[in-house]
């Protein structure tokens, strides 16, 4: 049995991961912050008994995705009009901004697998468990997401 550190340490260790995944899903800072806060409130209330650090991280990611989906399907969110489509990205690397916006423009199911695979370093097998999808589905989504990104980036770079 895995005994995690105190909640403050867990929050400090995983706040960036949870926020990035939430932001990838909802595409705006206030909602991503609300989602991250809700995830950690659920963690503190539930204090799940997990087998390892990897299980804890997977649990936090799964809860993040569930909270984000709940927010996006709520009647409140359907009535809200965002002030901007994307939050600004502070970067000195122009291609980094292009890549960021290309990823953010992907449909949610493709953004999720790209985020988990490339930014969180999960394997296809681990992603399939986290997202409750088959490995074949994850491989297909990664392949399609890469093709979409290649197309979007090629288009962006040819316009420069």
Image (cartoon, rainbow, N blue to C red):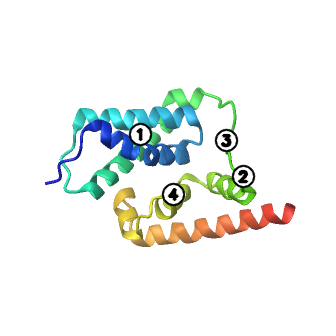
Residue for badge 3: 86
Q: CA distance from mark 2 to mark 4?
A: 21 Å
The 10 Å Cα crowd at callout 2, few under 14, some 14 to 19, many 20 or more, is few
| Mark in the foreground, 2 or 4 | 2
Answer whether labels 3 and 1 touch (C-beta < 8 Å): no
User: Which of the marked residues, 2 or 3, is nearer the chain's N terminus?
Assistant: 3
Answer whether labels 1 and 4 touch (C-beta < 8 Å): no
Q: Secondary structure at mark 2?
A: loop
Q: Secondary structure at mark 4?
A: helix
Residue for badge 4: 115
User: Which of the marked residues, 3 or 1, is nearer the chain's N terminus?
Assistant: 1
User: Which of the marked residues, 1 or 4, is nearer the chain's N terminus?
Assistant: 1
Give how far across and how far down residue 156 sits, in percent. Answer: 79, 61
- Picture residue at 21% right of the left edge, 43% below the top: 48
Numbered tag placed on residue 67 in the rendering: 1
Residue for badge 2: 92
């Amino acid at each position: 049995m895995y005994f995690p550190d105190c909640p403050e340490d867990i929050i400090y260790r995983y706040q960036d991961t949870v926020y990035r995944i939430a932001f990838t899903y909802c595409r705006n800072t206030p909602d991503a912050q609300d989602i991250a806060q809700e995830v950690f409130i659920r963690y503190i209330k539930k204090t799940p008994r997990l087998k390892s650090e990897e299980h804890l991280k997977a649990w936090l990611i799964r809860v993040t995705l569930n909270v984000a989906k709940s927010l996006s399907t709520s009647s409140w969110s359907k009535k809200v009009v965002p002030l901007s489509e994307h939050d600004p990205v502070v970067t000195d690397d122009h291609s980094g901004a292009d890549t960021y916006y290309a990823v953010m423009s992907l449909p949610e199911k493709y953004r999720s697998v790209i985020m988990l695979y490339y930014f969180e370093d999960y394997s296809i097998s681990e992603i399939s468990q986290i997202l409750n999808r088959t490995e074949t589905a994850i491989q297909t989504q990664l392949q399609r997401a890469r093709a979409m990104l290649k197309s979007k980036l090629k288009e962006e770079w040819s316009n420069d």
